[in-house]
Amino acid sequence: MRKPGSWMQNPTDERILEVLGTGLELGPTTIARNIDRHRTGVNRRLSTLVEYGLVKKVDEGYYEITDAGERYLAGELDADDLESAED
């Protein structure tokens, strides 16, 4: 069972992680089209997911899931235990 953090916006954050969990490097527009959300909202959430270490930016406009993100999807990581890189 997944353990979302109080800082997460679900189901959007989980859908983003699930799409990136396919192993592809994707941009916000492609992710948004695949989860039926607006690109600007996905872009904001990607920034937050990067800040907490679940996603990383691999190139200009492209993101991939991290090991921590994979562990979160598998239910092995409590997102409330993560600290923001901004703190």
Image (cartoon, grey):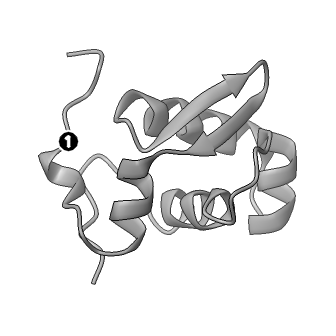
Q: Position of residue 28 (x, y in %)?
A: 77, 41
Q: Is residue 18 left or right of residue 81?
A: right
Q: Is residue 9 above or below residue 19?
A: above
Q: Nearer the viewer, residue 79 or 21?
A: 21
Residue displayed at 45% across by 34% down: 48
Q: Is residue 54 above or below residue 79?
A: above
Residue displayed at 19% across by 60% down: 78
Disc 1, SS? loop
State the quadrant of the C terminus. top left
Q: Which residue is mark 1?
A: 82
Task: Say few, some or many: other residues with alpha carbon within 10 Å of mark 1 (under 14 / 14 to 19 / 20 or more).
Answer: some
- Locate residue 76: give its quadrant: bottom left
State the quadrant of the N terminus. bottom left
Q: Tell how many labels.
A: 1
Q: Is residue 13 left or right of residue 68?
A: right
Q: Residue furthest bottom?
A: 1
Q: Position of residue 71 (x, y in %)?
A: 34, 62
Q: Position of residue 81 (x, y in %)?
A: 13, 48
Residue displayed at 29% across by 46% down: 7
Residue displayed at 60% across by 63% down: 21
Q: Is residue 55 visible?
A: yes
- Locate residue 32: give its quadrant: bottom right
Q: Is residue 39 left or right of residue 78?
A: right
Q: Is residue 86 left or right of residue 17?
A: left
Name the kind of residue labelled 1 in the image.
Leu
Q: Position of residue 64 (x, y in %)?
A: 63, 43
Q: Is residue 9 visible?
A: no
